[in-house]
Image: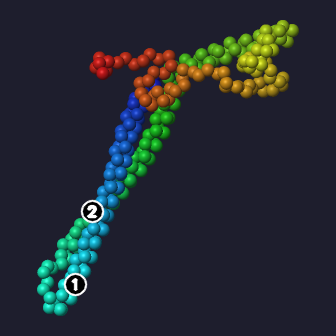
């Protein structure tokens, strides 16, 4: 029972860690989209700054010719300012790229951590079920049903060998293909194995239990009572 409770507690931790990582991954994805926009903006600033620098350099050449011709030079080219602008734009681009690279690295790192935690959670759920009282009870019920079923099959075979009819009409054999009919129709001398046809097998109450435990570590197993809720929880 202690191992069962420990697995419940471990599942609670794993569910919490996985939820936290999923939230972080969503935020990182949003940040990556935003960082892409910042990178594009930085590239536009570089292009604009480069264009302005080219214009100022061309103005410098033009002014040199004007000066040679003795013409008045009204304004001086802003080469230094243009170079500062392009350096700032390039620095912004480098910072944006470094930031985005770190976002990608952290996203990949968390994805790897998430995969590991999900693997641990799956193993914990399996272990939780295997050591649970509910699973032990289910196995005992299967053993009891198997024993009663085999006794019934033995009875039918013994009676059949003595000429007593099976009591299963031919048209019902074709229609329902019950497990009893399948066993009775096995060829003599085989290993006794039966090929089950799952068409009419009903779903058990254990179906979907893994998803339930992923959603809530306190989800009751079949046959268990739901966990008691505190006063504050019941008010939510």
Task: State left or right for residue 216 relative to residue 47.
Answer: right
Instruction: In the rendered structure, find residue 40 and report the number of the disc placed on it.
Output: none
C-alpha separation, residue under disc 1 versus residue under disc 2: 31 Å
Most distant residue in the right direction: 163
Task: State left or right for residue 216 relative to residue 77.
Answer: right
* Contact, mark 1 vs mark 2 (Cβ under 8 Å): no
Percent x, y of residue 177: 74, 20
| Residue depicted at 51% across the width and 31% down the height | 126
Query: How crowded is the residue under tag 1: few (<14 C-alpha within 10 Å), some, or many (20+)?
Result: some
Q: Which residue is mark 2?
A: 92
User: SS of the residue at dot 2?
Assistant: helix
Quarter of the figure with the C terminus: top left
Percent x, y of residue 36: 35, 55
Percent x, y of residue 11: 42, 31
Instruction: In the rendered structure, find residue 62 and report the number of the disc placed on it.
Output: 1
Q: Quadrant of residue 23?
A: top left
Regarding residue 3, the answer to whether it shows in the image is no
Residue 44 versus residue 15 in the image, above or below? below
| Residue depicted at 79% across the width and 15% down the height | 171
Task: State left or right for residue 125 relative to residue 182.
Answer: left
| Residue depicted at 40% across the width and 46% down the height | 110
Judge by depth and name the residue closer to the eye, 18 or 61. Answer: 61
């Amino acid at each position: 029972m202690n191992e069962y409770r420990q697995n419940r507690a471990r599942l609670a931790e794993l569910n919490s860690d996985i939820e936290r990582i999923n939230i972080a991954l969503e935020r990182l994805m949003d940040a990556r989209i935003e960082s892409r926009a910042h990178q594009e903006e930085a590239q536009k600033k570089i292009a604009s700054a480069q264009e302005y620098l080219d214009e100022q350099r061309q103005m410098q050449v033009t002014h040199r010719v004007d000066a040679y011709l003795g013409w008045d030079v009204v304004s001086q080219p802003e080469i230094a300012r243009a170079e500062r602008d392009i350096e700032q734009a390039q620095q912004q681009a480098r910072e944006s790229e470094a930031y985005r690279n770190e976002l990608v690295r952290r996203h990949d790192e968390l994805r790897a951590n998430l995969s590991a935690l999900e693997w641990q959670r799956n193993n914990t759920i399996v272990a939780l079920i295997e050591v649970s009282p509910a699973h032990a009870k289910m196995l005992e019920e299967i053993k009891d049903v198997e024993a009663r079923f085999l006794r019934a099959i033995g009875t039918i075979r013994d009676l059949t060998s003595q000429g007593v009819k099976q009591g299963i009409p031919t048209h019902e054999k074709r229609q329902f293909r019950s497990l009893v009919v399948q066993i009775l129709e096995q060829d003599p001398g085989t290993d006794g194995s039966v090929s089950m046809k799952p068409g009419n097998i009903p779903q058990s109450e254990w179906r979907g239990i893994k998803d339930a435990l992923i959603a809530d570590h306190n989800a009751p197993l079949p046959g268990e009572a739901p966990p008691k809720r505190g006063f504050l929880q019941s008010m939510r």
